[in-house]
Image (cartoon, helix red, strand yellow):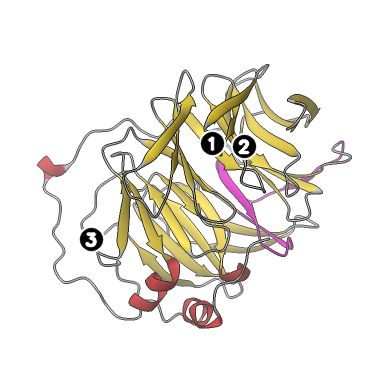
């Protein structure tokens, strides 16, 4: 269960005292540089380790307190789309374009197993709260989506979720572990968003509202709300028990690929390809702050993957330029009470690097 931030930090975030201007460039620490494009990130339960998945198929383990130092756990044959730590921090799972999921020993830094049999790419992996089950999401674009359950210790499939007509881009367990959320769809079609009873998945709850493919789903710490986002650029909140829509948060100007909770569930964090990470009041729905404002010193595609530590105090950003940046959320909240930037340099055309688009 995620631990809440201090009341002072939560109050600053929720009360709207954060400036809407971009954060100062010195308010982060670079953990990694000159790496292959970073497609996915995940913190260990204690926040002491960070795992990354890269465009070259590598899976790397980082100590946030030792910038530049990492261990390469191993490689997939193609790009890694999703990574996750088990609840005890001992196991890492990674899902790849190569139609496999690999399990890694985070302590011994070695591969434990390769899970096969997928019909298509694996975009998302998530451990159940007890760490005994792994959920995977993926599929074949124009054929069918896949969401499966695996016994982590036995390395075998224990269940699947039927009726997904397009691939599943994100999977997430509820805090109790009895519900699985799947989000996906097809480009330029209404998103496919469902809530499944893990014990009896025959009659899922279908959620409506997303106008395009759903790219990310996340439960609030109390399990009562499901936050989703995707290509329609909106963050949507749903009642997690009945699937009824609660709110739509707008402000991003490009597809939103990350959504998560901080400050004990009082704050929602979202990140998009508009080069911004935004903070929202989870109750009132208003935007309370942002970093990397796309209108200031914009570098297209800079923010490409995001992870929040379980205690909500660390925010990791991965980039298409191969950097991993680490922000302190309490420090960020404190510093954003006033405008911070001194001189903002608009990138020259020659500064931009042409990079491949985010995979469809």
- Residue tagged by mark 1? 82
- Residue tagged by mark 3? 296
Q: Residue at x 74, y 45 (%)?
A: 180
The region drawn magenta spans 202-227
Instruction: Mark 1 or mark 3: name the one nearer the start of the chain.
Output: 1
Drawn side of residue 240 relative to residue 58, left or right? right
* Rendered image: mark on residue 125: 2
Question: Is 52 one of the magenta-colored residues?
Answer: no
Drawn side of residue 117 relative to residue 132, left or right? left
Q: Residue at x 56, y 49 (%)?
A: 44
Q: Observer-nearest residue: 177 or 85?
A: 85
Circles 2, 1 touching at the beta carbon (< 8 Å): yes
Drawn side of residue 359 relative to residue 221, left or right? left
Confirm whether residue 360 shows in the render: no
Compute the Cα span from label 1 to label 3. Answer: 30 Å
Q: Secondary structure at mark 2?
A: strand
Q: Position of residue 165 (x, y in %)?
A: 68, 28
Instruction: Mark 2 or mark 1: name the one nearer the start of the chain.
Output: 1
Displayed quadrant of residue 106:
top right
Compared to residue 210, the image places residue 342 above or below, namely below
Q: Observer-nearest residue: 329 or 243?
A: 329
């Amino acid at each position: 269960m995620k631990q809440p931030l201090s009341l002072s930090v939560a109050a600053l975030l929720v009360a709207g005292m954060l400036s809407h201007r971009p954060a100062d460039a010195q308010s982060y620490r670079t953990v990694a540089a000159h790496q292959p494009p970073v497609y996915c990130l995940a913190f260990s339960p204690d926040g002491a380790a960070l795992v990354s998945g890269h465009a070259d198929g590598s899976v790397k383990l980082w100590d946030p307190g030792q910038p530049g130092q990492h261990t390469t756990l191993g490689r997939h044959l193609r790009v890694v789309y999703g990574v996750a730590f088990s609840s005890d921090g001992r196991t890492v799972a990674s899902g790849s374009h190569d139609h496999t999921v690999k399990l890694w020993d985070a302590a011994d830094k070695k591969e434990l197993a390769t899970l096969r049999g997928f019909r298509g790419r694996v975009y998302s992996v998530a451990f159940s709260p007890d760490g005994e089950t792994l959920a995977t999401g993926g599929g074949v674009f124009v054929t069918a989506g896949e969401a499966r359950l695996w016994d982590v210790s036995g390395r075998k499939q224990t269940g699947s979720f039927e009726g997904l007509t397009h691939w599943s881009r994100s999977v997430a367990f509820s805090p109790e572990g009895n519900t699985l959320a799947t989000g996906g769809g097809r480009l330029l079609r209404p998103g496919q968003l469902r809530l499944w009873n893990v014990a009896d998945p025959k009659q899922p709850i279908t959620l409506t509202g997303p106008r395009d493919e759903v790219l990310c789903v996340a439960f609030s710490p109390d399990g009562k709300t499901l936050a989703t986002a995707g290509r329609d650029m909106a963050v949507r909140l749903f009642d997690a028990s009945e699937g009824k829509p609660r709110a739509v948060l707008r402000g991003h100007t490009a597809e939103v690929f990350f959504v998560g909770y901080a400050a004990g569930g009082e704050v929602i964090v979202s990140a998009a390809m508009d080069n911004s990470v935004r903070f929202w009041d989870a109750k009132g729905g208003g935007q309370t702050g942002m970093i990397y404002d796309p209108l200031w010193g914009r570098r297209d595609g800079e923010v490409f993957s995001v992870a929040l530590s379980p205690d909500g105090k660390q925010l990791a950003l991965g980039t298409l330029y191969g950097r991993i940046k680490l922000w302190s959320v309490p420090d960020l909240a404190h510093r954003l009470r006033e405008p911070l930037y001194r001189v903002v340099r608009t990138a020259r055309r020659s500064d931009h690097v042409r990079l491949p688009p985010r995979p469809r």
